[in-house]
Structures are given as structure tokens and as C-alpha cells.
Image (cartoon, rainbow, N blue to C red):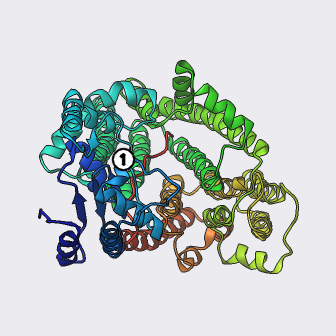
Amino acid sequence: MQTAADAGDAAALLAAVPAGRRVALVDPRFVGHVHALRLGLTDPRFAAATVPGALTARPEARGALLRALRRTTAAVGAGAPVVAPDTDPAPEDRTVPGRIAVALEAEGTAVKRPELGSLTATVPTDAGARAAAESARDEVDDEAVRLRSAVKAHDGFFTTFAISPYSRYIARWCARRGLTPNQVTTASLITALVAAGAAATGTRGGYVAAGILLLVSFVLDCTDGQLARYSLQYSTMGAWLDATFDRAKEYAYYAGLAIGAVRGGDDVWVLALGAMVLQACRHVVDFSFNEANHDAVANTSPTAALSDKLDSVGWTVWARRMIVLPIGERWAMIAVLTALTTPRIVFYALLIGCSLAACYTTAGRLLRSLTRRASRTDRAAQALADLADSGTLAQGVAAVAPGLRGAFTAPAVALLGTLVMIGGALFLPYGSPLTVAAAVVHVVLSGLAVARPLKGALDWLVPPFFRAAEYVTILVLAARSDAPHAVPAAFGLVSAVAYHHYDTVYRIRGGTGAPPHWLVRTIGGHEGRTTLVAVLAAVLTHASGFTTALTALAVAVALVVLVESIRFWVSSSAPAVHDEGELA
């Protein structure tokens, strides 16, 4: 830390700082809480940020900061206003950091102004104002505010009342010992994998241990986000790890339960894969709807307005959060049922609960979409096209087919293709060439569905329909085959493909765009993989051939998507983000 004699000296000192470092300007008269300075000066998500009396800039905003500082110094020295003559600047914009922040924004550099709530941050101009500011600062417990703000603003009932009251203190303990959110996230993953291993023993003691360890894993899962908020340690890698590991933990636990059940004489692999398929399809409904409305400038739906009104009534808030069976309630249910009942009952409860939750949330999204008055943007259409995961076959059809017109044509065609594919896998004789014919029809209809930009009111349904067609087809064909261990192999294949689809979501959320086209083409796209599985089921009719083929396909897809995904996220220059996560 260095002290500048004046603004000109500050410019010289800033210019001497190595280009790769963050810099900050703080008015020496500043009075406020330490956490107010943390919020304004250490959050890595923003190129520039300010609180009254302080300003920071990351390396990418350093040049703009120096230019704004020199302009501000010249303007103040010449007596010229830094803000427009017809405006009355806020008190914080009359300080040197405040004037520079205004100048930065005038140049086009976004400056984050974090909400401080009850925290104090000000630059007093006389002794009386300083005394008042110091009194206001001393009346508020800086650490208590920091702990409260570590907890996610919108969370489920179980997480809010059964986990967060003490996990925030675990987060503080971790912060004081130098642990990072990514380390806690990894510990949560390891704990969940141990829980899955305990469930795989198939013993009552193993099930009890698995339930307890799953809850411990969830506590750590809450702690990593709270630690990130408490210590402002946000990163693109952290958001990706947190979101990806949540899915890995849950699906690994499903596999552990299925293995344990088989050891006890009850084969529930179909139920385990069904639960994973339902959960993945449910998530893609949420992701697709959110991306379709990502850049909506206002709440234009009467249904959404009603939802906001219900959220203003205390009991309805918690009822609505619980009915969607968010991750806290879901994991608590899984843990308790694992310890007290059997894997079959666990999966029945999951399938019933998640089905009801999916019906509730999807119905609400349909109503919002049908009553929404705003049009979809190009950005939303591109996100939906990326989520569709169309491969070479569907894109080839889309390139030569005329775009189908009509407000609901795209989702209707996608739904028809899904029904044809699933119906063929379910009702035609297993191994019939007609199943391959159904896959060809699915390819054609999938291409027609994406031949035009997905800007219709219900076009966000196209990616969920594609996911359902692929995942359910794999499940049905594996379950109907006589090949031993075909369903566990299908579980591995769906896991690998689902990872690719979740990875696509998190790349879009991070502002880095979808995975490269070569990756989608290499792994076939949704329609290519679905067709390939149908062909394999028709051709490989001997005992273990289908299982071997599914296993090989799962390994090939997993290797390609994992290697490219890890390479991308490790080397990504995307801005730091913090994913608050989905309630589900």
C-alpha cells in the first residue's frame, strides 16, 4: 500500500504497478467497515467496482482507470465539472474515487456498485460528519453482516433452516485456515463417493453410513458456496466444479444404491437410470426456459406477476420452494430413506417426487411463456440452438429443409419426433429394423425443428424433447434387451452424455459460449447417438454384444467430452463467476 500526495502522484504510482495486478484507490478520509471495502475492492467478478471513497480496477480496466484519473485530475485542476452540468452528483461521486468512477462509466467501462445494506462506507468532510460516520460504523457488527451475507439469498427450506444456521460458521472456520471453496467442493465430492461406496455394500450398516455421509456431503456442498461469498473467492473454475460435482455426486450415489440392491438380490438399475433421466430432463427444462428468458428486460407475463405476488407472502414462499423438491429436500429424503428402508423405495420416492415437481414447474413455465408479451432475442435463440445439441444429421436436414412456420411448430415437430422414437423403442419388437426407421424419422423431424431460429413462445421446449428422446430411448432399449449388464452400461452412457449437456449449460452461463462444433459433431449430436443406439440394438442380438457396444460408446463419449471440457475450464479466460445454482 502506498500513499499519494495528490491525484497526479496517484497516477504515477498506479502506472508503476505491474500490468497484471489489480489496483485500488482509497480516499484517506474513508470511514467504514472493512467488509464494505472487501465488497468494493476484492470481488474478482468485476473489472471495476466502487464504494463511497474507494475504487478498484482489474488488469483489463487498468488503462481506462489511468485515463479517467488523468482526465479527472485535469478537470478538477481547471475547475471543470466531471459530471454533466444538469446533474446533481451523489455525495460519493464528489470524492476523487467517485469522480473517477463516473469518468470510467462515461468512457464505457462498467463499474460495479455493490449493495452495502447496513454497512458503512463514506468520506466525511468535517469533524461532525466523521463522528457520525464512526458512530454508525461502531453500531453495526461487521462480522455478523459478513456471516449473514455468506448465506444464499434464495434457498430451500431444509437448507435454510437445517444447514445454513451452522454451515456458515464452518465456512468462516475454513476461511481463517486458508482453505479455498474448490478444496471444500472436492471434499464434498469425495464424501459423496464414499457414501456411494457404503451404499454399494448392500448391508444395513452400509446404508446407514451412506445416509449420514450423504448429509455430510451436502453440508460441505453448502459450505463451499458460503465460503466463496464470505471470502469473495469467486472463479469460473469454482462455479463449474460446484455445479458439475453436484450432478456427479447424485448420480454416483444412485449407482451405489443400485449396486447395493443387486447384492441384496433386488435389481433396481432400471429405476436408478430412470431417476437420473428424469432429473436430467427436469434440469434441462429449467435451463432451457431460463436461457430463453435470460435477456428479458421486464416481467411481461401476468403469470410471472402472480408468482411474484405469491412470493411476497411468507408461507407460500416456502411451500413453493419445497414443492419443487430442491436439492436440500431431495438429498435429505434420499439420506433418510436409504438409512431406514431399501434402495427400491428410495427410487420410487425419487421418481414420484421428481415427477410431481417437474409437472408443477413445467406447467408454470408453460403459462408464463404463453402469456409473455416480449419477443425472443437472437441471443436467446442461439442459446436454445446450442442446448439442442444437434449433430451433423439434424443440421444437414435443417440446411436443405424449408423452415416450418408457425408459433408452435418447432416444439410440436420436436415432440412428434420424440414420440416416434420412444414409441418405436418401447412398442416395436426388440431388435426390429423398424426401430431404426423410427430413428430416421426422428432425425428428419429433429432437423425440421431447428431449421428456423428458435424464437417462438414455446421453442424452449425443443431441447428438453431432444433430451427425453435420447435418454429414454437408451433406457428402454437397454431394459428390453436380454444382454447382461446392459442397463448399467446404459447408465454409464447417459452419465457421459448428460455431463456434456450440463457442461454446455455452464459454458453458456459463464458467457463463454457453447462447446466447439467439432466436439458436437465428433460425439454425434443427440440424433446421431440415438440412431446409433437403435442400430446397435438391431444388429447386436447376441448375449453380450449390446452391453459391450454401449460400454465402448460410453467410454468414447466420456473421454472426448471430459478431455475437452477440462482443457477448456483449466485454460479458460472467462471472467470469474459465482453460480448461485438451481433450487432443483
* Residue farthest along the front direction in this orientation: 79
Q: Is residue 476 visible?
A: yes
Q: Is residue 50 rendered to the left or right of residue 424?
A: left
Of the pair 84 and 507, the residue shown nearer to us: 84
Q: From the top left corner, tell me how far across and down residue 16 is, in percent.
A: 17, 78
Looking at the figure, which quarter contains the N terminus?
bottom left
Q: From the top left corner, tell me how far across and down residue 574 is, in percent.
A: 40, 68
Q: From the top left corner, tell me how far across and down residue 377 is, in percent.
A: 69, 62
* Residue farthest along the top direction in this orientation: 315
Say above or below: 278 vs 65.
Answer: above
Q: Is residue 529 visible?
A: no
Q: From the top left corner, tell me how far across and down residue 473 is, in percent.
A: 66, 56
Kind of element beneath mark 1: helix
Of the pair 466 and 369, the residue shown nearer to us: 369
Return the residue at label 1.
91
Of the pair 258 and 179, the residue shown nearer to us: 179
Snapshot quadrant of residue 65: bottom left
Three-letter amino acid code at the position of disc 1: Pro
